[in-house]
Image (tube, grey):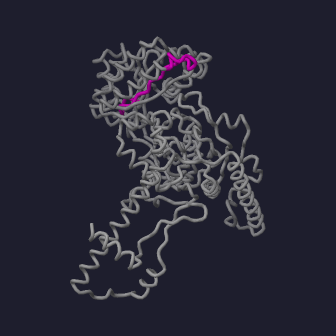
Amino acid sequence: MKSILRLRAIARARKTTTPRICANTNGQAFRETSTSSRSTSSRHEGALPERSPAGAAIALLAAMGIALYAGMRVERLISKHESNKAPIYASNHEMHTALDEIEGELRQAREQSHRNFGESLTSNNDNAGTRSDQGPLTLELEDLISTDDTDIQNHAFSEWSTSNSTNKPFAIIYPETTEDVSTIARICTKHRVPMVPYGAGSSVEGSFSAPHSGFTVDFSRMDKILSIHPDDMDCVVQPGVNWVTLNKTLADAGAGLFVPMDPSPTALVGGMIATNCSGTNAMRYGTMKDWVVNLTIVLADGTVLKTRRRPRKSSAGYDLTRLFVGAEGTLGFVTEATLKLAVVPRETGIATCSFPDVKSASAAAVRMMREGMTGLAALEIMDEMQMKVINRGGGTLKSDGKSRRLWREEATLFFKFSGADRQSVDADVRRVEQIAKQFGGTKLESASNEKEKDAIWAARKEALWAMLAQREEGTEIWSTDVAVPLSRLSEIIDVSKKESSELGLFNSVLGHVGDGNFHQSVMYHPSDKDETAKVAKCVQTMMDRALEMEGTVSGEHAIGLGKMKSLHKEVGEETINMMRRLKLAVDPFWLLNPGKVFEHKAEGRK
């Protein structure tokens, strides 16, 4: 211990270049290096002076002591943050002040944008000014900042999520540029205002709820496709771009490329990145993280960074891109993304097959996956209750665009096939039919043209909307998902379905069985506390069972508000603490989407 204290004394006496953690007038952390160390380094440019062995040993010991001292200071800083009381957020008065400041700076930016745009027209230079090629920024600030009650309610509540907060955002802000987002973040940090990102509002785990109020930052106005590089097979987009619109744009341009993710048709790129979404195509193409090349990020203090450049692969430094994908906006806000694009398959196919029960259907799905069929691109399941829901809603539109089709009310598998030629696709269709027959499946019904493909697949894509349309007044849908290793899939689906059926309530199972991910939905009355408690217990039991099977509590819905406790069970306290340290490093005041993924440690002790 004496030697350590002695080394610390040497370190202090030498006024080393060890960075110090300081705070500016706004309380924001920054790094400072002593003046004496900078002047010392300037005196020793060029070759390093020779040292005797004894001198080198002393220097090494001093360096070790300095490193130990710096490490202890950082550890104390982290411990201090984590042991403090829960974060203190802005009062309503302070949020009013912050909103006024944001409005003032956004107004200045727009006035400058209009001046630049006018100058660019005068000089006939399309590259002059801010966004001159697309026109000036919105001048009417009432379109960018809203405190309307209806607007606030729409951003606070989701009818397809049970993870809604009783608190609401103080205001909704609609940025148009990365600079807007940086301004919002900087001022919010100054006044300690929570910031909640919002995309399409399709989260089922409360990812956009505002449990600590604050400002909701709605990215739907940042909806520009900034560039498409067909030869590089990538594109650059803002977070408010809808993936369906993006794929239509690519198709209209004749690029022969598409974004292979297939989540809700309402989903926007920013939310897809924030939740690491997937969808029906994940079995073939992977999840969102596999298709993000780089990101432009705004941190809590307004700092703007780009995670990497545009090559399809890189091993340069930390993979910050993956750090922000799936973080639900708790580490930074995505304002631009470069996405890889996939080649549209030359040949595709759609087919469906019914089974006696959901266990047989899921067991058949697992067997099909083990066959290694390269042309099997998606494998989806819907139980008999889900098929009844489709029929109660009038079925699905047939390929003629007029009449409607009613479905067999049995557990059903839906298949997508793709390949380089028709022969390979047809061969996989025949093999799938052979396996289905072994598990009691009916003959495959295959589509023969594009309209028939769309008509068959519509049953799967319309499943959630069909449930919402038939939801009784006063009820809500508790929808959640888990994922398990393929070998345990049939078992967990069968047991979960039996347990949920014992509730005596409407319940259904559907999902992406091709990658071990399924969803369970239960319709219940939230006003009935006993009923709500039983449903909550049933859902929790399903998630616990998934963990017992070495699975996950969230295959594609993220964590949000609804699954924070289950995340602790899944990864453990040490892993959660590591996540906390990462968040504290970039968001020391806990302002970015607070109350999601995991709690501040002080909050967790309550």
Left or right placement of residue 531 versus residue 550 in this view: right
Judge whether residue 583 can be spotted in this image. Answer: yes
Q: Position of residue 320 (x, y in %)?
A: 43, 55
Q: Which quadrant, please, contains the N terminus?
A: bottom left
Judge whether residue 455 can be spotted in this image. Answer: no
Q: Position of residue 297 (x, y in %)?
A: 53, 55
Extreme residue toward the front, this view: 2
Q: Residue at x 46, y 11 (%)?
A: 504
Report the magenta residues as a range: 512-532
**Within the image, what quadrant is residue 37 found in?**
bottom left
In the rendered image of this protein, does residue 258 appear above or below residue 226?
Answer: above
Q: Residue at x 36, y 22 (%)?
A: 493
**Within the image, what quadrant is residue 503 found in?**
top left
In the rendered image of this protein, does residue 471 appear above or below residue 208?
Answer: above
Q: Is residue 403 magenta?
A: no
Q: Position of residue 107 (x, y in %)?
A: 74, 57
Q: Residue at x 58, y 33 (%)?
A: 165
Left or right placement of residue 182 versus residue 430 in this view: right
Q: Position of residue 582 (x, y in %)?
A: 43, 53
Left or right placement of residue 76 versus residue 469 in this view: left
Q: Residue at x 57, y 60 (%)?
A: 27
Q: Is residue 517 magenta?
A: yes
Left or right placement of residue 1 versus residue 308 in this view: left
Q: Nearer the viewer, residue 401 or 155?
A: 155
Q: Nearer the viewer, residue 209 or 529?
A: 529
Q: Nearer the viewer, residue 234 or 239?
A: 239
Q: How many marks?
A: 0
Extreme residue toward the left, this view: 53
**Within the image, what quadrant is residue 550 found in?**
top left
